[in-house]
Image: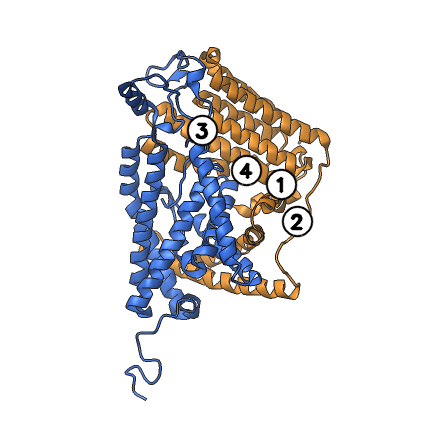
Chain colours: A orange, B blue
Amino acid sequence: MDVTAVDRSAVLGDTLLHRAAPASKLVAAGLLLGAVVTMDDPLVAAGLALSLTGAAAAVRLPLRQMLPLAAYPALFALVFAFAAAPGPATGALFVLKAVTAALAVVTLMFSTPYPQVFAPIQRITPTIVGDALLMTYRSLFILADKFADLQRAIRLRAGISARQPVRAARATTRALGGLLLYSFDLSQREYDILRLRGYEGGLRVSVHTSRDRSADGAALAYATLVLGVAVAFRVLPALAGYAWIATLAGALDLTVGLLIGRRTR
Amino acid sequence: MSHIHIPDGVLPWWLWLGGWALAFGLLALASREGARVESRRAVPLIGAVSALVLVSMATEIVPIAYHVNLTVIAGVLLGPWLGAISAFIVVLVLALLGHGGITVVGLNTLVIASEMAIGGALVRTGARAFGRTRIRPVAAVSTVVTLALTTTMLVGIVAIAGAGAATRETGALDAETLEFRNPFSGGVVSVGLLGGHDHEGETEEEHAEHADEGGLSVGRFAAVVYTLGPLGWLLEALVTAGVLGYVARVRPSLIFGAMRVEPQYPRYGDEHGRH
């Protein structure tokens, strides 16, 4: 889970999606999650996953970094599908739902700086929760870097080796212990900074507006269309035999998206 | 498997919405209780500990689909109320990175907050009873007991979801015969947009039959998590014991400061208590 790659893309990227207002992207992500909740056909789910990948490729989001992150929940969904699904088609549906939902949120996070995503959450949660959320994300980068350094140092000293699992486990545990001590020192430093700055609760985030209205419209129209398709396949019995069309359309979206992404490069 | 890796759209809407409502109630209560701690101190502390839990969760043990959680350690360091806030933050950030569904954030918050509260309480009670020198075994046993309890909570959630979960074999493609079929022949009303089937007018036998066809297989799920789970519990127990033991040795005030655990060895004099 490379959190720094997500942040780098969200802050430094300049795709069509980056130019849309965070509020529009949050609503679009919500509509896409609505589609994931609604759909109950693996073929429709596959179509949506392909289409979303195509959309991300068309606006030139970093697919190589996004796809592993979106595929990560598939591993856990596979275990859940094996454990609880009543049949193979439902198992496939579980995995595809996990991947599609992950793709939707990962697309949001790769195109929107985290304070902008957290700002609406801050408004509906108690002050301490919203502030701690922002502080967590800040600390996450620092601790992730520190942990990577610690692991590298241990590996260089031959502390992590497959041949000596007990020694490796002991070294990793000490690294985590060291990280815990470091995280406490970090929180102490942050406390000092907050005290110096006269913090009394309530970190403010200035919300970005849209830099391109057409980007907002495109994101919302796409998400609404996807939700419409998912609802249609769920409620209209006449469409039941044509779910393969959704997969085909998704594959087409992916192809077109890849071509557009390559042409605009 | 301390928290739910259930994808969005699998659990019935009333269950995950109920989870969100309960989680918000818990957050409101936790914020009120947490306000007793100075917010300037609480905010960075929650941030640092939540980030630590997130970093540990990013390390996954592939064959058993398990990752270290450090939730018991977070419970020891933060206590139950600040722990509940940390649980929500951890689950939300994970969901935003594609790890765990957005709809199950509420339920996951309840499970992880319970894990932090129970784990923290067990370690504190154990340390008081057996002394700080036995922090490693106390931490290991507390972690196993806590994870067993929260895994049972997880099985309970899946059991509550049961046949109401949206897991119907309604795909147009029949995976067994590889033929296209019409699963909606019962009519549009029977589809049930956000929940399970509408079995109005069925006899009890028919209803039970349909429930077996479409619902989550709770028995199999329980069998799998109780088979794979203990491996994870053991790993987590070893890591928790190792980390708490290490911290207790190099900076005991972090763990025992808030606990007021009396040392089991003489405080003054040499190792035999002689002055």
Q: Which mark is residue A112?
A: 1
Instruction: Work out whether disc 1 and disc 2 sit on a shared chain.
Output: yes
Q: CA distance from mark 1 to mark 2?
A: 14 Å
Q: Earlier in the sequence, mark 4 or mark 1?
A: 4
Q: Earlier in the sequence, mark 1 or mark 2?
A: 1
Q: Amino acid at mark 3?
A: Leu
Q: Do the CB atoms of the residues marked 1 and 2 lie less than 8 Å apart?
A: no
Q: Earlier in the sequence, mark 3 or mark 1?
A: 3
Circle 2 crowding by C-alpha within 10 Å: few under 14, some 14–19, many from 20:
few
Q: CA distance from mark 3 to mark 4?
A: 15 Å
Q: Is residue B160 left or right of residue A234?
A: left
Q: Amino acid at mark 2?
A: Val
Q: Earlier in the sequence, mark 3 or mark 4?
A: 3
Q: CA distance from mark 2 to mark 4?
A: 21 Å
Q: Amino acid at mark 4?
A: Val
Residue that carries the numbered disc 4 in the rendered image: A106
Q: What chain letter is assigned to the residue under label 3? A: A
User: In the picture shown, does residue B193 fall above or below B228?
Assistant: above
Q: CA distance from mark 4 to mark 1?
A: 10 Å
Q: Position of residue B28 (x, y in %)?
A: 51, 50
Q: Amino acid at mark 1?
A: Thr
Residue that carries the numbered disc 3 in the rendered image: A96
Q: Is residue B161 left or right of residue A63?
A: left
The quadrant where residue B272 appears: bottom left
Which residue is rendered at x = 48% and y = 13% of the image?
Answer: A239
Residue that carries the numbered disc 2 in the rendered image: A205
